[in-house]
Amino acid sequence: MLIFLSCDNAKGLKAFYDAIKYGPNHLMVFGGVCATVTSIIAESLKGWNLVQLSFAATTPELADKKKYPYFFRTVPSDNAVNPAILKLLKYYQWKRVGTLTQDVQRFSEVRNDLTGVLYGEDIEISDTESFSNDPCTSVKKLKGNDVRIILGQFDEEMAVKVFCCAYDEEMYGSKYQWIIPGWYENLWWESWINSSQCLSKNILAAMEGYIGVDFEPLSTKVIKTISGRTPQQYEKEYNAKRGDGQSSKFHGYAYDGIWVIAKTLQRAMKYLNATNKHQKIEDFNYTNHKLGKIFLDAMNETNFFGVTGQVVFRNGERMGTIKFTQFQERKEVKVGEYNAVADTLEIINNSIRFQGLEPPKDKTIIQEELRKISLPLYSILSALTILGMIMAGAFLFFNIKNRNQKLIKMSSPYMNNLIILGGMLSYASIFLFGLDGSFVSEKTFETLCTVRTWILTVGYTTAFGAMFAKTWRVHAIFKNVKMKKKIIKDQKLLVIVGGMLLIDLCILICWQVVDPLRRTVEKYNMEPDPAGRDISIRPILEHCENTHMTIWLGIVYAYKGLLMLFGCFLAWETRNVSIPALNDSKYIGMSVYNVGIMCIIGAAVSFLTRDQPNVQFCIVALVIIFCSTITLCLVFVPKLITLRTNPDAATQNRRFQFTQNQKKEDSKTSTSVTSVNQASTSRLEGLQSENHRLRMKITELDKDLEEVTMQLQDTPEKTTYIKQNHYQDLNDILSIRNFTDSKDGEKAILKNHLDQNPPAQWSTTDSSRTSKDPIEDINSPEHIQRRLSLQLPILHHAYLPSIGGVDASCASPCVSPSASPRHRHVPSSFRVMVSGL
């Protein structure tokens, strides 16, 4: 006989004890719907050797076999959904979940069991939240922890509040998936929606797509059960007999429960008949532990197909079928089922609907995306760089080909080559600045950090160091008036440039040894995916940095700044040098100005755009290209134009100034031709040859003059010739090139002489007297005095400048040119001072 239990605690317990005390011996206890009654009775059954079978008690507490060894149930417990949930999580590859549990023992036990099921399955429970009445705080925490898959355990009333909070926190839609109990009543939200502060449409919007998990009331398989009916036939017959009465989802489990008891007794009888023919099940009593153990073992062996599916017990727990339903458009739709016996999950094709294009991610997928330099941009700037290098190569070819031209010689061709080399190194650094993690490995990128810094630094110093070095040579020559001769060879300039590079190398080596550049990765705030995928993009950017980056950059900038100031000083000091081939001060000033302004602007904008690699690289590359190109063009384009149009004009000295010492040195003022470079040395030799030739010419004229003088003394017949050609000879002597002043100066000297000795005396002499006694006239004291008055000024003006004396325009050798009112600068074509007679 069986004992059927009621759900009422008092009535159920009284009925049970009355049946035990007053009724006949009962073989089993069938029933137990409410957890409170069932748990009390199940715990005491061991003392009476009674096996209890429940068809509706789902509380997980009853699964404890140490406490309830004689308890069985045909309905799966609430914990039976956890293996099904695990299978679903694995199916969609969700490896990170969070739990939200109402503070009720029933739900807490399910959560605890779920934790044990997920443990060791490579599924992380990233956050566990619980609440009593207001779930909003817990929902916020779940969102703060980036929980996308939420496993909820709460009743219908709390479910409405939970989805209201989810709507407020925007935890619904394509990015979130809620999995909650599926045993709620039909249209359950309508009963509790008034207790929520949210509108009905908002709650329904948040509920859309949630998945409910519950046991399957009846099997969906069209297979005949142990009763000979299919589950569908049974359901049809049940509904016909039920009529208008309320349906219970446990009726199929109750039906299968009767069959379980029947099959258990049948197996027990067979066992008794086979082992002990003298003992029958009617001999069972509450103290007969042997028969009680036989009934317990027989029930554990239950295995048949019932209307609820395959009926199998594992440690007293039903291994049933779990169904999955999804809330779609205000109704629940079955989307899959889990067979606990076979441990298989079946998802009905195209039945489950996610609100996105794909199932939600179990967390915000943060895809780190390297912000790299655009390949088209790199290609364009590389093409411009190559054009710049081709231009530099053309300048190098021009410089080498024309190195023997006076214009190129005077501009220091070796220094020009260094300027071109520095420009090409600066160009080459652009290729390295454009190589990032998209082109090279991390280790190679770290090496490039050092290499590109060295190349750019050395290239800058080489170009401007060579430019400033040759300008320093011009400055040293033209600003030192006391040196007779100064030759500064290119070897000395190379030493100067090498010294500048040595300072660079010392700084760079110390930088590399003490605090080398390293590859660092800077991460920026997450950004939504431009393609609309359920991922977030976290931009990352590679940098070349070290611990004391500011200090090292300050040292480099300070040194380069001093170098630029030195160049500006030299350019200012040599601004008045009149030889175009030597005077690059204007172009140096323009180069320094452009480079300085562009570097300041480029450094500032580059720092402000460090999170935009394309903009940063574009600015850095354009600054380098502009500075290198403008510098090379300012140095070589004017020379190229001059060499093609008027090569001699650039090498002519338009304004060699005669420099005098103090008054005590006025009488022995020395002049010198200074060699500007090796090319100008050859020009000096040519000038010296020309000077020697002219001095020889002067010597010959002096001899001629002496002969004329002697003839005047010895040959009276030539008096008439002298008188007629006297002024013409004077003009011929005074017109000697490079040793006389301009024609105006000649006229002034002659005028001065004629003022003192008027020619009218000669022209007005009595003709009768001249013809009468020519010898007497020539040798007379008056004529001798007149001859000397003419010869001495001629010798003074023609000879003294050739031995380093006063200017030919100076009237007196005793007065310095600066003190003489008659002193004037000689024309540019004759401003050559000759040293040594």
Image (cartoon, rainbow, N blue to C red):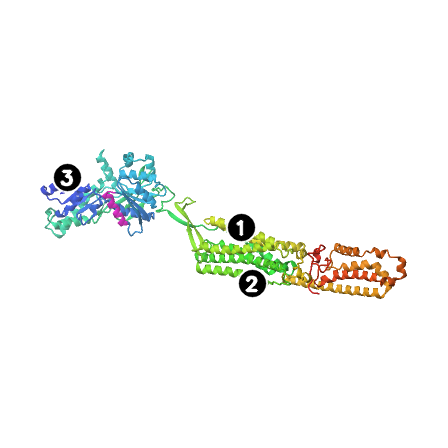
- Residue 23 is covered by the magenta coloring: no
Q: Which span is picked out in magenta?
A: 103-117
N-terminal label among 1 and 3: 3
Res. 815 in view: yes
- Mark 2 or 1, closer to the camera: 2
Question: What residue is rendered at 38% in x and 43% in y?
Answer: 357
- Mark 1 or 3, closer to the camera: 1
N-terminal label among 3 and 2: 3
Q: Return the x and y of residue 782 as percentages of the image width and height.
A: 83, 61
- Residue 739 position (above or below residue 329): below
Per the image, the residue denoted by label 1 is 598
Per the image, the residue denoted by label 2 is 495
N-terminal label among 2 and 1: 2
What amino acid is found at the position of numbered circle 3 in the picture? Ala
- Mark 3 or 2, closer to the camera: 2
Per the image, the residue denoted by label 3 is 10
Cα separation, mark 2 vs mark 1, equals 29 Å
Q: Return the x and y of residue 260 as percentages of the image width and height.
A: 19, 45
